[in-house]
Image (cartoon, grey):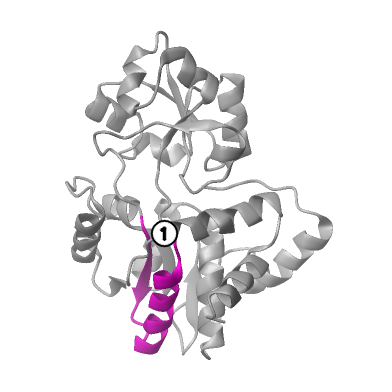
């Protein structure tokens, strides 16, 4: 879920000073979980980094010491670090996280997914309150491609004559929402092209150029609207409900948990789209976006 940005030198320097506070070029170099410092991680995805920065600033405002370990990578890279205790707090997404720990889950709706996730979380970890904010996986096509073949739902892809190629991060090839899942749930055969920018500009360009016909892009990504793309309706629940949900270790005490739950309660789906829009359109660093949002919510 990464969006590549060409920031100005001044903004880039500000972001580096703020989010580079983890200190090492290796985002997992911290011992983690030691003392009273809460180690917060994030995916290598701008939206997830913004949420992680909101957690960090909210905790700091309440007197907690925080170690930022941002832009670690995708789930396959950072989940082992959470499970090992190197990371204490991480903003996650309920459905995809549940499928990581329980690939054959039958839960699909919000409450069912959250309940199943609470049961699936490994010992030593817990999920805090989930937010109303969602960032849902979706299959996306260009408006031109949708109109040409009359596409509104994923099932409508059966109308397409000729090969369909799905573009996404390489991890998606073996995930439940990759080509195998598409075939199993909808009977649609698709090839796969790895594009390592999490639905970012390279993926958008590949869609527009016709190099791929289908992409996985999160619904809160403003590029869907900006590029006039179409998210196909998932009528069979291939994509699980995906609410922002914090994963916490024992180092997150009751006071810190209360702070993070307040953040989750305040954040809405529209908020998340707006936060992402400020990153994409205004090219602001996560620190600024987070501090403004916390001030607006009177949580700073």
Residue 29 visible here:
no
> Is 290 within the magenta?
no
Residue 261 visible here:
yes
- Rendered location of residue 156, percent (x, y): 33, 20
In the image, residue 157 sits, relative to residue 195, either above or below, namely: above
Q: Quadrant of residue 228?
A: top right
> Is 245 within the magenta?
yes
| Span colored in magenta | 243-268
Q: Quadrant of residue 269?
A: bottom left
In the image, residue 14 sits, relative to residue 165, either above or below, namely: below
Drawn side of residue 282 relative to residue 30, left or right? right
Residue in the foreground of this view, choosing between 48 and 230:
230
In the image, residue 103 sits, relative to residue 118, either above or below, namely: above
Residue in the foreground of this view, choosing between 251 and 57:
57
Task: Say which residue label 1 marks.
Answer: 133
Drawn side of residue 264 relative to residue 237, left or right? right
Instruction: Tell me which residue sits at (53%, 31%) in the image.
Output: 229
- Rendered location of residue 189, percent (x, y): 33, 19
Q: Which quadrant holds the C terminus?
A: bottom right
- Rendered location of residue 167, percent (x, y): 48, 30
């Amino acid at each position: 879920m990464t969006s590549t940005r060409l920031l100005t030198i001044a903004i880039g320097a500000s972001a580096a000073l703020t989010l580079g506070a983890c200190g090492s070029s290796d985002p997992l170099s911290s011992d983690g979980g030691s003392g009273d410092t809460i180690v917060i991680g994030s995916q290598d995805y701008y939206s997830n980094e913004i949420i992680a920065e909101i957690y960090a600033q909210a905790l700091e405002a309440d007197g907690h010491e925080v170690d930022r370990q941002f832009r670690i990578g995708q789930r396959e890279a950072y989940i082992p670090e959470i499970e090992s205790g190197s990371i204490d707090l991480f903003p996650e997404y309920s459905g995809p996280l549940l499928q990581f720990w329980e690939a054959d889950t039958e839960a699909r709706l919000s409450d069912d997914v959250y309940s199943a996730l609470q049961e699936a979380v490994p010992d030593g970890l817990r999920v805090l309150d989930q937010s109303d904010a969602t960032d849902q996986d979706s299959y996306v096509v260009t408006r031109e491609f949708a109109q040409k073949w009359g596409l509104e739902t994923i099932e409508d892809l059966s109308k397409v004559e000729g090969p369909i190629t799905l573009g996404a991060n390489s991890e998606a090839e073996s995930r439940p929402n990759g080509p195998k899942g598409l075939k199993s749930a909808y009977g649609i055969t698709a090839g796969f092209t790895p594009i390592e920018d999490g639905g970012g500009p390279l993926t958008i360009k590949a869609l527009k150029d016709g190099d791929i016909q289908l992409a996985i892009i999160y619904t809160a990504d403003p590029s869907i609207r900006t590029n006039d793309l179409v998210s196909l309706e998932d009528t069979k629940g291939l994509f699980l409900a995906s609410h922002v949900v914090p994963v916490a270790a024992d180092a997150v005490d009751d006071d810190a948990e209360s702070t993070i739950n307040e953040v989750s309660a305040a954040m809405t789906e529209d908020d998340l789209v707006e936060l992402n829009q400020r990153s994409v359109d205004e090219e602001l660093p996560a620190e600024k976006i987070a501090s403004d949002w916390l001030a607006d919510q009177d949580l700073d």
